[in-house]
Image (cartoon, helix red, strand yellow):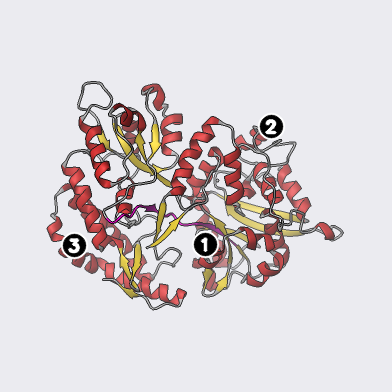
Amino acid sequence: MRQITRTRAASICSLSLLAALTAACGNDNNHSSNNSESPSASASTNASSPAASEQSKDPVTISLTEPDLGRVWKDDNAATKELETRTNVNLKVTMYPNNDFNSKYTVLAASGDIPDLSRLGGFDYQNYADQGLFMDLTDLIDKYGPNLKQNIPADLWDLTKYKGKQFVIPYENVAGKEVPVVRKDWLDKLQLKAPTNLDEFEAMLKAFTFNDPDGNGKNDTYGMGITNSYSETFMPIFGAYGIAPGLFGGSTPMASYVKDNTIVPVAVSPEYKAALEYIKKLWDEKVVDPELFTIKSDQALQKVAQGKIGYFNAWWSIAPQQLTQQLKMNEIVPEAKWDPILPGLTGPDGKSGMYSFGNVGAGMAISAKSKHPEEAIQFLDYLSTQEGWELARLGVKGTHYTEWTAPRTDEGQKAYDEKWLDPLSQIVSRVDLVQKLGEATKDPVEIENNRFINAASSYTLYQDVFYGVPLTDEHKTYGADVAKFEEEMFIKFVTGKESLDKWDDYVEAWKKKGGKSVLDSKVAKYNELKGTQMVSGV
């Protein structure tokens, strides 16, 4: 499993970040709200309109389709009109609801009549690339996209190559999304420090469960609980053993890592078994909420908000937004304070880490039939400049905002609240500018959000070796059954309904369920795309 240490923090202002992350969580889409003094643009970034020297030419029409990601399209959007003027284009934009976008786009692709520009989630372009729908952008980017090439990290360009061709311009995602969090006020009351390893973590959970951390004289708290998915809450433990199982299918089913030229599936690895043994010990010690495997997410959140849980691991926004702002936990439990566990939990071999959600949030493809591919690239290239990025995300300076650190103007806030101000902000990413925007904020609410955003980006991240590799036919056939079997056996092993002495039987059953067929097919596909000679690890 590839390890990624994210040193570039994702300090992204809360409101528009939440909208983007919710839509992307997968696509993380992955993210700005308040404004700060504009950071100086890179000296090599051309912030002028790509058509500045050609304004005598008639503007060209460029069609574009994208998921709405919580936005609405407004034809008379002043920011869009200004963007069209600066780039000498007329935009014809169609947005579909997030949950309907893929089905709508599949119909377009089947007809062979797609827009000039398509914003597709993650690696979805791979589903269509072999149909000849998209243009190889390599030469166009070299010639017309200097800012795109400079501002998008090199590893994203490499990740999004398909059979040696560059069919999309990648949209950078922030790979670290989740944070292990703890009741800081409970730690203080029990005179404990935040845990740094699994032994200290176990001791903390015991104290939170049995030492009356809320001081009500009742035995009614648990060290570990959940807010959404129980597989998430165990992720830092798996990370302490150097693995990330992929959330039982989640966004990267059949999560695997490389060892000695061999691709090993996490769910049947020795490290996974060791992590299971540790988790079972916690279960047997009764420091885990006994409803953890059965409770619904809204009920779990309420239990946490009522002050019954001392630790959970989940999306960065749960503690500062859902618990504090939406569920108003501090009105229920005034003393409650949540802190990220930093730098993370270290395991017996000194490893520590979290699940990587991947750094490719989307991809912009250009139709092979486009009559204006050069202008399309120039348009996207302008969006990658600081000037273009500000306009697409924040609106017209002086109308929608004044300075980055200042609140939006009344007009800008109204436009943002009505969700039509920044629909083009999801086309080209500038994570570095988003970070500077977050660092400059003076809003205490957003400062609190950024504590958790930055924590999520600070952990070592374990990336599935198959990240970006298209699903195989075998995976489509057997993958869901294999994932379901993994989940069922995880619960049985942890709760003791199945002894870990039967581990070898589990591995053999996993193979027969289709695990080996899926793995072998994915390894073959990996070798085909990467030009390697990896072998299957089961």
Quarter of the rendering containing residue 89: bottom right
Mark 3: secondary structure: helix
Position of residue 70 relative to residue 122, above or below, is above
Q: Earlier in the sequence, mark 3 or mark 2?
A: 2
Query: Is any atom of residue 28 visible in this view?
Result: yes
Q: For residue 363: magenta?
A: yes
Give the residue drawn at x 75%, y 36%.
Answer: 398
Quarter of the rendering containing residue 476: bottom left
Give the residue drawn at x 39%, y 65%.
Answer: 465
Q: Is residue 234 left or right of residue 143?
A: left
Residues 492 and 458: in front is: 458
Quarter of the rendering containing residue 338: top left
Q: Amino acid at mark 1?
A: Thr
Residues 402 and 87: in front is: 402
Q: Which label was assigned to residue 538?
A: none
- Foreground tag (3 vs 1): 3
Give the residue drawn at x 31%, y 37%.
Answer: 311
**What's the distance in space between the residues labelled 3 and 2, CA to CA?**
60 Å
Q: Amino acid at mark 3?
A: Tyr
Give the residue number, with chain letter if any, for mark 1.
106
Please rate how many residues cluster around mark 3, counting C-alpha atoms within 10 Å: few if below 14, some from 14 to 19, many from 20: some
Q: Position of residue 265 (x, y in %)?
A: 30, 65
Give the residue number, with chain letter if any, for mark 2.
409
Give the residue number, with chain letter if any, for mark 3.
506
Check the picture and name the quadrant holding the C terminus: bottom left
- Foreground tag (2 vs 1): 2
Q: Position of residue 218 (x, y in %)?
A: 20, 23
Give the residue drawn at x 55%, y 47%.
Answer: 69
Q: Position of residue 461 (x, y in %)?
A: 41, 55
Q: Earlier in the sequence, mark 3 or mark 1?
A: 1
